[in-house]
Each structure stands twice: as structure tokens, then as C-alpha cells.
Image (tube, rainbow, N blue to C red):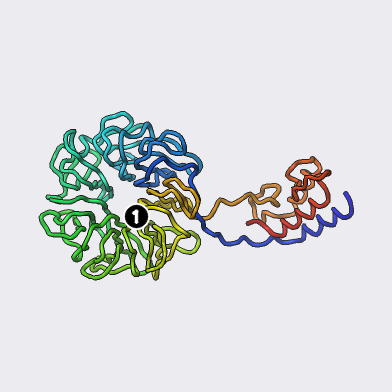
Amino acid sequence: MSHRISSVLALAALSGSAGAQPCAPAWGPIGSGLNNAVNSFVVFENSLYLGGFFNSAGGGPGDYIARWSGQAWSPVGTGMNITVETLAVYDDGGGADLYAGGLFTAAGGVPTRRIARWDGQAWAPLGEGIGNDTTSSLVRAFAVFNGELHVGGFFTIAGGMTARRIAKWNGQAWSPLGSDMSNGEVYALAAFSGELYAAGSFSNAGGVPVEYIAKWDGQSWSDVGGGMDDEVYSLFVYNDGSGAALYAGGQFFEAGGDTAESIARWNGTAWSPVGDGMNSTVLAMEAFDDGSGAALYAAGAFTSADGSPANRIARWDGQSWSAVGSGLNNTVRTLAALNGTLYVGGNFTSAGGQPANFIAAWGCPPAAPCYPNCDGSTVAPVLNVQDFGCFLTRYAAGESYANCDESTTPPVLNVQDFGCFLTRYAAGCP
């Protein structure tokens, strides 16, 4: 070995590596995406399941429902015969399964009215399901409350019995919730502070006048602080530092008689605005930390939040709203957080200014391989003297890895590659 090369190695072995830099979250596509809009996400068995209008995912099969593992797309059985509107995970005592609701009347080729269960191997109906064969029915929302799966939407029959707009499934049979809703639709459900909240386009629940939102205590329906002045599309429980609360999103301008544009917060006794709200509809919410702290993310059709530009998605830190990069070019319908990534689905075809077909991800890009960690060590410090021995061995073997400066002039492996390796070692790993 030349004196110059040995001197480079000795100097490098004494050098410390630079510290890792903070993550800079960004938008990215999920492969080639989908061929039509996404309505709903749910996280199940460490994968993202999604339902919607599409019949292809990642260029492969995916009839109205598909699975993203974080690395690849796969179908969920043979899917449905028409649109999936909502997804949930529920354990009826025999283990957690995936539930899907929508307009469909067949799942995996099996007749099932608007709702079906996936046990990881096959689709199955839930009794007689929702609606019947002659009426137009639709499942839009799920929530687990008191150990039972509650289902909301536009229907008047569940399990063959009268159940208007809302019903519950205990794993064996369907039953109504009191006298239910007499008009409108249920768009969203959520359990909060020991009660079940239902929201939508209705104005009557169990014979009680309500304004687009109502709560069920297990025995009867009641009003929620005067409700809203227009439809509510989403509900989400979150603690922004001021205590757990129920957040409601929709196309309203007032909550509890006070101004609250498209989003409002219910603390169990009263409504309050969330900043200055949005300039259009809020359809989905999710909690996520992109590296800058835990926050509530809201998404929908809006283009501003707190009066500042925010294209279809915004971040609430407990004090104010802020944009999430340059956002999306069309409506966002659903959000889900999984393994350090915020997934976004809807009608858009662009995220952060780059193509993204109906699904996109916000978060830290996957870490690139650390070049100077030649031996691939994961034990701290990952950069150490063994990496120099590794580099020398691979250099002597003539491996392309050792062409650190990527020169093309013969000899491509030369002393400059050692200087290059030292520089990259001193810079550390990203």
C-alpha cells in the first residue's frame, strides 16, 4: 500500500462522523397509484387497506378494494362488484377482521348486501346485511362502540328488520338503535366520552330535533350543543394539548350558534372554533407527527386554512393551521397514518406538484443507503475503522462500489477514490 493511501486511512480512522440531519418531510407517490378515486383507508395487520371507485391498484387487479404493504400492492380476494365507501377493523370475539361497507352486493363473488367481512382468506356476509334486493341502500360509516360494530349510511333495513340510517352488529345479529334517524343520511360515526356520535345530513334522531349531529348514550338520542347549520362529513377524537375533544368537519359555517368554518371542536359541553377554519369542506382528519411534533391533519376540498393558502390539507398544532407542502390538486377524502407516513387518498392526480394517482404519502423520504458504512453495520457507531478495511478489501477486489468518485477514465479505481471515501465518511450518514 502506498504511503499516501495508508496516511489517508489513518487520518480517516481518527475522524468522527457528522450527526444525522433532521428529516424534511415531502410528498411522494405510491407507485403508479390507482385508476380512480379513493374513499376510505384503514390500517390492518401493519398494512394500508383502501376502498373506493377504482378497479386497478399499481397496475394490477384491485376491484374497489386493495392492500398496500408499504412495498407492494395486492388484491383483497377478488374484491367487490361495485364501490366501497368505508372500512373498519372489528373484533367480534373471534379475532380482529377487516370490514367493508358501500354500495356493493357481492364480495369475493359471494352475495353480501352492502357490507362484508374479510378474515384474511375470504369474504363473508354479515347475516342479511344492509337493505334488500329491491331498495337502494348505502353504508357510509363505521364505529366500534360498547363492543359492537355500528354502521351508518342511507338505509331503512338491517338484518331484515327496520333500522333507519344506523344499526349495530354484535357478531351474530343486527339490531336498531332506538327509533333511529327519520331523515337524511349518516356520514360519520365516532365514540367519544362514553357515547356514540353520529353526523350527517339528518335533522331528527329518535324523535328528537337535532342539527346534523346527535349522540347516543346506549338508551336514547340527544342533541349536541345545538349542532351545526349545515352537513357534517367527518368526526375524529383528538387531544391538541387542551384535552381530548371530538372534532367535526363538514361544510357548515356555525357550530352551537357561533362561527366555526368547516371544522369545530366539542369538549363534551360546548362547541368552539378551530382557529379560523377553512374556506370549504372538511372530509377527513387524522393525527400524525411528521417530525415537527404531533398535530391534527384535516383534509377535504378547501384551498385555505386560517385565511392562508392550504391546498386540500392543513396541519393544526393546537394554536394555528399551516399548509402541508404545496398540497394536492383536487379533493382529499381520507387520511391514515402508518409507520411514519401519512397516507392521503381522494380525487387528486398531483401531490406536492408531482404526479400521484389518487393516493400519495407525506413524510420523510426513505433513507438512502449510507455509502461510507461499507460493512453495513447497524451497531453504533456505524461508521468506524472497520469500514476502511472493508473499503480497502473491495478496492483490491476491483468492485464498482470502490469507485467512489464515479470516474470513467482508466484506471477508474485510483487514489482519488480514497480521498472521496474519506470526505463522505467525515460527512457522516444522512
Q: Residue furthest top?
A: 109
Q: Residue furthest right?
A: 3
- Residue drawn where x is 40% and y is 39% of the image: 66
Q: Which of these two is toward me, 37 or 247?
A: 37
Quadrant where the C terminus sits is bottom right
Residue 217 in the image: x percent, y percent?
A: 19, 57
Q: How many marks?
A: 1
- Residue drawn where x is 85% and y is 53% of the image: 5
Q: Is residue 157 above or below residue 146?
A: above
In what element is the residue under mark 1?
A: strand
Residue 255 in the image: x percent, y percent?
A: 24, 66
Q: Residue furthest left?
A: 207
Q: Left or right: 121 with respect to 11?
A: left
- Residue drawn where x is 23% and y is 55% of the image: 199
Q: Which residue is mark 1?
A: 284
Corner quadrant of residue 397: top right
Q: Is residue 428 above or below residue 133?
A: below
Type of amino acid at the residue the image marks with label 1: Ala
Residue 55 in the image: x percent, y percent?
A: 38, 36
- Residue drawn where x is 35% and y is 42% of the image: 52
Q: Is residue 7 above or below residue 52?
A: below
Q: Residues within 10 Å of mark 1 (few under 14, many from 20)?
A: many
Corner quadrant of residue 328: bottom left
Residue 351 in the image: x percent, y percent?
A: 46, 52
Q: Which of these two is toward me, 418 or 148?
A: 418
